[in-house]
Image: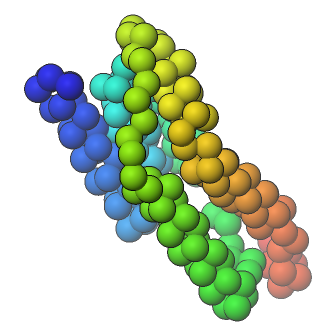
């Protein structure tokens, strides 16, 4: 990677990291939407600097769409539907997943793959993920699936009776 690509990668990584921290600590829908957009721009920049232009475009559209949804004034935050025990079990599961992913990442040899070049070639990334890091890819896909199902269940949870009657 030449110096221009390295600068783009590190600037994009810093933008994604700062956006994620701001997303966690800012208050208000509009501010959180901007922070989520910054995270998306940073992640798309990381992919673009790694010559995965198609993945960068997909990430950019997904994050910007989510940022626009979060920034809406009628956006309803997800309430914590799980009790303390389930949150602790979830934290232990996340720690176990982190250990498995760290083992998969540091298990020894680096993968050798042929780079076919081009700004929109995501074939190289896909071959690397599925040929050498299939366990990590499946784990991330499982985490995303569980997070989406949990968010959907928490989103559709019935509101408490006093909250329903207070809005009449």
Quarter holding the C terminus is: bottom right
Which residue does the image show at 42% across and 10% down from the upper left?
A: 116
Image coords of residue 151 (percent x, y)? 72, 60
Q: Residue furthest bottom?
A: 85
Which residue does the image show at 32% across and 52% down from the upper left?
A: 17
For residue 10, what is the image quadrant? top left
Q: Nearer the viewer, residue 75 or 50?
A: 50
For residue 130, what is the image quadrant? top right
In the displayed structure, 60 sits above or below 30; it is above
**Left or right of residue 121: residue 1:** left
Residue 133 shows in this picture: yes
Which residue does the image show at 55% across and 64% down from the upper left?
A: 100
Image coords of residue 134 (percent x, y)? 62, 43
Q: Residue furthest left?
A: 3
Which residue does the image show at 73% across and 59% down from the upper left?
A: 146
Residue 87 shows in this picture: no
Which scheme is used to colour this image of the protein?
A: rainbow
Image coords of residue 109 (percent x, y)? 39, 45
For residue 23, what is the image quadrant? bottom left
In the displayed structure, 116 sits above or below 11; it is above
Q: Nearer the viewer, residue 77 or 39?
A: 39
Quarter holding the N terminus is: top left
In the displayed structure, 52 sits above or below 93; it is above
Image coords of residue 92 (percent x, y)? 60, 81
């Amino acid at each position: 990677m030449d110096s221009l690509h390295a600068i783009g990668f590190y600037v994009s990584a810093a933008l994604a990291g700062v956006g994620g921290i701001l997303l966690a600590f800012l208050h208000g829908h509009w501010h959180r939407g901007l922070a989520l957009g910054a995270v998306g721009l940073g992640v798309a920049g990381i992919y673009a600097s790694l010559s995965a232009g198609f993945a960068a475009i997909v990430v950019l559209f997904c994050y910007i769409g989510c940022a626009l949804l979060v920034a809406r004034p009628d956006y309803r935050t997800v309430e914590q539907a799980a009790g303390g025990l389930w949150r602790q079990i979830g934290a232990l599961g996340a720690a176990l997943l982190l250990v498995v992913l760290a083992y998969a990442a540091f298990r020894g040899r680096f993968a050798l793959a042929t780079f076919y070049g081009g700004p929109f070639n995501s074939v190289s990334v896909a071959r690397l993920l599925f040929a050498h890091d299939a366990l990590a890819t499946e784990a991330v896909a499982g985490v995303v699936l569980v997070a989406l199902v949990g968010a959907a269940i928490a989103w559709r949870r019935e509101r408490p009776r006093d909250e329903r009657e207070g809005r009449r």
